[in-house]
């Protein structure tokens, strides 16, 4: 175990990945790659202040170092960087440092003020340098959506002024976008030769983008999202403040909308991206394999030959195949991505033959109304189907393949689940006689099943409680005892305790991580149930304790690689690093769909397209497992925006849920056997996801055969599993009824004492919750535990008291002594004399006043040794006392140091209780 020691080679590999996720959108007159000894002037403060990640829990990875663009460029010595401009920025930045919003949660601005430029200065620079590169940076994140405002989705006046002036004096201009999300592109003009979406490439991102611009890596990224000419054309772009978000665009998300209804509103199409070389793609052959069924081995195999037809650069190409299905009765998008593959690195004139396989299941559509005669089934309607092969959704240079289906064929019959109860109309294409399509609307089918009947008819059988027979969890592993017999030993109190996770920064697991769960009481641990640990997040391990880890590129960049094997390898390293840190579960990947470019957490998610999301997410989950840890698929489902994320009801048809929003999760469960899922904060069709039975049981477990654990998001709310209605954080009984197994989180050591005052006991008493439902979740948790390193280890990682040597001084005169072993906190650094050697439990008293749902933290050191990390949300005016650590102390001098990230947390006292 190497806690806080980043995995060797991981950062270097993430650099290679970051450069391959770079998307080159424009490259007139071969602006990139820069040539040897070319004179280059770099504008924009983000050349120094590179954004390596977005904000919130999906960022905040502590790294040993980060890289920036300009210094990486200079180090490479290929081009001559304009000195005067470099120095001007360097000087200006001294007086204009990064504004981090004061370190408070979600307070970092979306962008930083640009250095003002005068005409004279830009002209002077242009007299020396031939080419100009402009870097524009943006960030966003958890609890901080983007906005259609200057400085977020739109450029600021300062940035526009910079572009205008640079374009005025330079003949050759390239723009690099160091962004967490797609941004408005209306500033593009004909004087700009080149544009690169470099995204945010993690700690090695500065090096990675330089690899591309100097030609060490040929860009091979493709857009995972459609870039429209204006934000107003995205169908989901609308008022975000109401508490019901009606998904009227239905399945027409991203390119499914644009290619069907609004082709002219696209600036850069989905799947698009240039290379330094060129490729030809030829369809060699295709074959229909097997019957038209849901068997994953049945479908169409297409063999293509990809040739690098350039003569200078090696490169990789992405073959993409889009389905054009007959409009039929259901209505269809004009194009739907059904398979893709990336070549290996091809040298000029080299070719590679690839066979791509499209299962029929991946082509089918979900009939949620029964209009085809098959309600709640995946079907292929009768008619002519076309497969378009190319290197973007708009590439028509290749042969298309067509085939016919003579009658509507059921691919998979399912049952109605998760249907809306609010009536609304959804988008549907209207086909005109001249084959043109316009937007029409139809009523969305509403829920017809009886949820109460469904839940009650599937109640698990109760296992009779028995006294402790001494069975341990390892006996289950050795097949000496059944899991049911083992669980029978858990008393009602144990069953209540085990479904509560504790955190953040639990003292008995890796410091600074998000939660501990499973063996959260001594009694549970005595039964051999390990205390497991989970940590954020999609871009690497976030340890609030300040320990270092590797910061990977953001998820959107990873999806832009369109390279499943590369991503699997990257996440395998992530899995190893997670395991090396004593962590069982990474709280990622995030795989929500980019419904709108304004979702602040889009950077944690992959794409607007469910297939690209599916393949990359499955690769991530597989990789993490191969590395020795587990992935947690989040946020299940429809976290389409951050504003009002805890209350906003996603009102969505089951067709859109099945074909778009659930797809990635389905693939990661079915193809990669992911073992953990985190539900979202929001309700979907009236039920908060953490108490949504159809989501967590009917679909996830009964249909997809998921065998793992489901946890809530941190401090989530639940409502009634049958009647819906109001939600609360204490309604954990309804969470259990839906088979969301774990409530994340109550305070540390709060599970056994029901610190959150949840309603499990009350529901059991009234028979509104069955013991068997609690036992079902306890079984899920224990079965999962068997697959963790915490179980293999068989002991607490941080159960013992650390020794803190005292400083021995000649005299202790004038040094404060503790009265009643209580240290009142008056300063960020305090010395005191400790008089009684021994082992102590440290109880810390604090209060916290963060805004809204924000969180903050503080690291505590004793004689420069890490003692504890407090991570907390608002304590709502209450002063809280909690056990934070055990420590062995000596007689002598101690210096206590507190490292706060904001002034919202007040630590009042530390009490040393002798053990
Ligand atoms: C986020 C999750 C994260 C959790 C633990 C929540 O606020 O939504 O994505 O994993 O915190 O940090």
Image (cartoon, rainbow, N blue to C red):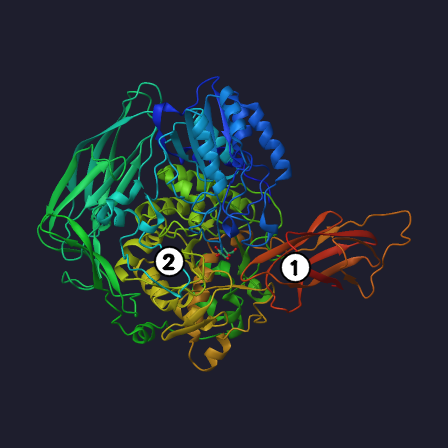
Crowding around mark 2 (Cα neighbors within 10 Å: few <14, some 14 to 19, many 20+) is: many
Which quadrant of the rendered structure holds the C terminus? bottom right
Q: Is residue 633 left or right of residue 445?
A: right
Q: Position of residue 444 (x, y in %)?
A: 24, 65
The residue carrying mark 1 is: 905
As drawn, is 605 to the left or to the right of 659?
right
Q: Secondary structure at mark 2?
A: loop
Q: Is residue 467 above or below residue 873?
A: below
Tell me: residue 205, above or below residue 475: above
CB within 8 Å, label 1 to label 2: no
Give the spatial CA distance, label 1 vs label 2: 32 Å
x and y percentages locating residue 144 in the rendered image: 49, 54
What residue sits 83% from the left and 59% below the top? 836
- State which tag comes first along the sequence, 1 or 2: 2
- The 10 Å Cα crowd at callout 1, few under 14, some 14 to 19, many 20 or more, is many
Residue 477, percent across and down? 46, 57
Q: Is residue 578 above or below residue 410?
A: above
Q: Quadrant of residue 179?
A: top left
Task: Pick out the residue farthest to the top.
Answer: 37
Q: Is residue 547 left or right of residue 408?
A: right
Q: Is mark 1 within 8 Å of ligand 1?
A: no
Q: Is mark 2 within 8 Å of ligand 1?
A: no
Q: Which mark is residue 638?
A: 2
Instruction: Out of 307 and 261, give the one closest to the viewer.
Output: 261
Residue 663 x %, y %: 31, 53
- The mark total stands at 2
Is residue 662 something one can see in this rendering? no
In this orientation, which residue lies closer to the viewer: 754 or 650? 650
Q: Residue 665's mark?
A: none
Residue 904 seen in this snapshot? yes
Q: Quadrant of the N terminus?
A: top right
Under tag 1, what secondary structure?
A: strand
């Amino acid at each position: 175990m190497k806690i806080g020691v980043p995995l060797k080679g991981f950062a270097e590999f993430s650099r290679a990945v970051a450069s391959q996720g770079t998307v080159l959108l424009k490259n007139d007159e071969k602006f990139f790659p820069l040539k040897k000894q070319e004179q280059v002037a770099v504008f924009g403060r983000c050349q120094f202040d590179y954004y390596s990640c977005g904000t919130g829990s999906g960022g905040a990875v502590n790294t040993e170092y980060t890289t920036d663009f300009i210094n990486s460029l200079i180090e490479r010595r290929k081009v001559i960087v304009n000195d005067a401009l470099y120095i001007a920025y360097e000087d200006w930045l001294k007086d204009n440092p990064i504004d981090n919003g004061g370190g408070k949660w979600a307070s970092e601005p979306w962008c930083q003020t640009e250095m003002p430029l005068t005409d004279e200065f830009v002209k002077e620079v242009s007299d020396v340098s031939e080419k100009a590169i402009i870097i524009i940076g943006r960030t966003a994140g958890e609890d901080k959506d983007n906005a259609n405002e200057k400085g977020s989705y739109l450029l600021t006046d300062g940035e526009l002024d910079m572009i205008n002036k640079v374009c005025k004096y330079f003949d050759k201009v390239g723009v690099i976008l160091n962004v967490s999300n797609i941004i408005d592109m209306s500033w593009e003009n004909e004087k700009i030769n080149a544009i690169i979406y470099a995204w945010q490439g993690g700690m090695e991102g500065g090096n990675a983008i330089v690899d591309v611009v100097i030609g060490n890596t040929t860009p091979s990224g493709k857009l995972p999202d459609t870039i429209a000419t204006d934000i107003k054309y995205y169908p989901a772009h609308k008022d975000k403040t109401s508490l019901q978000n009606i998904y009227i665009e239905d399945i027409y998300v991203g390119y499914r909308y644009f290619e069907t209804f609004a082709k002219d509103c696209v600036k850069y199409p989905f799947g698009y991206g240039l290379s330094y070389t060129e490729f030809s793609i030829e369809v060699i052959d295709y074959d229909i394999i097997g019957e038209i069924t849901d068997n994953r081995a049945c479908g169409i195999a297409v063999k293509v030959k990809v040739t690098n037809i350039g003569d200078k650069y090696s490169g990789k190409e992405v073959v993409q195949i889009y389905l054009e299905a007959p409009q039929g009765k259901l209505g269809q998008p004009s194009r739907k991505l059904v398979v893709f593959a990336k070549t290996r690195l091809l040298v000029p004139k080299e070719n590679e033959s690839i066979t791509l396989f499209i299962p029929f299941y991946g082509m089918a559509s979900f009939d949620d109304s029964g209009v085809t005669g098959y309600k709640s089934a995946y079907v292929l309607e009768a008619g002519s189907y076309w497969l378009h092969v190319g290197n973007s959704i708009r590439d028509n240079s290749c042969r298309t393949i067509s085939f016919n289906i003579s009658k509507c064929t059921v691919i998979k019959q399912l049952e109605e689940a998760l249907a809306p109860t609010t009536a609304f109309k959804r988008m549907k294409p209207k086909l005109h006689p001249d084959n043109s399509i316009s937007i029409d609307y139809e009523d969305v089918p509403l829920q017809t099943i009886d949820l109460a009947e469904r839940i009650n008819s599937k109640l698990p059988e109760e296992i009779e409680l028995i006294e402790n027979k001494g069975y341990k969890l390892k006996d289950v592993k050795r097949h000496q005892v059944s899991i049911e017999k083992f669980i029978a030993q858990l008393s009602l109190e144990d069953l209540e305790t085990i479904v509560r996770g504790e955190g953040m920064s639990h003292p008995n697991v890796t410091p600074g991580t998000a939660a501990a769960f499973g063996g959260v009481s001594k009694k549970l641990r005595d039964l051999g149930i390990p205390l497991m640990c989970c940590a954020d997040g999609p871009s690497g391990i976030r340890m609030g304790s300040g320990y270092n880890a590797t910061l990977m590129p953001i998820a959107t960049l990873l999806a832009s690689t369109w390279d499943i094997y590369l991503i699997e390898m990257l996440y395998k390293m992530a899995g190893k690093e997670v395991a090396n840190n004593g962590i069982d579960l990474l709280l990622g990947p995030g795989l929500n769909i980019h419904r709108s470019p304004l979702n602040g957490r889009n950077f944690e998610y992959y794409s607007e397209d469910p297939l690209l999301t599916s393949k990359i997410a499955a690769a991530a989950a597989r990789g993490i497992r191969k590395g020795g840890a587990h992935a947690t698929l989040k946020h299940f489902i429809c976290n389409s925006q951050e504003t009002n994320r805890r209350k906003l009801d996603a009102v969505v048809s089951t067709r859109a849920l099945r074909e778009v929003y659930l797809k990635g999760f389905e693939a990661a469960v079915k193809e990669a056997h992911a073992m953990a899922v985190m539900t979202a904060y929001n309700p979907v069709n009236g039920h908060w996801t953490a108490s949504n039975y159809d989501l967590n049981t009917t679909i996830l477990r009964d249909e997809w055969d998921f065998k793992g654990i489901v946890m809530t998001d941190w401090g989530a709310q639940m409502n009634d599993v049958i009647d819906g209605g109001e939600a609360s954080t204490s309604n954990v009984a309804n969470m259990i009824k839906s088979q969301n197994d774990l409530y994340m989180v109550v305070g540390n050591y709060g599970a056994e004492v029901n610190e959150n005052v949840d309603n499990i006991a009350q529901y059991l008493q009234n028979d509104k919750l069955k013991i068997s439902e609690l036992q079902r979740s306890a079984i899920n948790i224990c079965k999962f535990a068997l697959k963790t390193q915490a179980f293999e280890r068989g002991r607490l990682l941080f159960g013992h008291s650390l020794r803190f040597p005292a400083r021995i001084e000649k005299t202790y005169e004038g040094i404060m002594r503790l009265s009643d072993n209580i240290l009142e906190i008056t300063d960020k650094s305090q010395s005191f004399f400790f008089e009684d050697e021994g082992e102590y439990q440290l109880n810390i008293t604090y209060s916290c006043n963060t805004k809204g749902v924000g969180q903050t933290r503080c690291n505590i050191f004793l004689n420069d040794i890490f003692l504890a990390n407090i991570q907390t949300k608002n304590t709502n005016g209450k002063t809280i006392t909690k056990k934070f650590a055990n420590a062995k102390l000596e007689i002598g001098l101690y210096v206590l140091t507190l490292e706060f990230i904001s002034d919202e947390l007040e630590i009042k006292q530390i009490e040393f209780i002798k053990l």
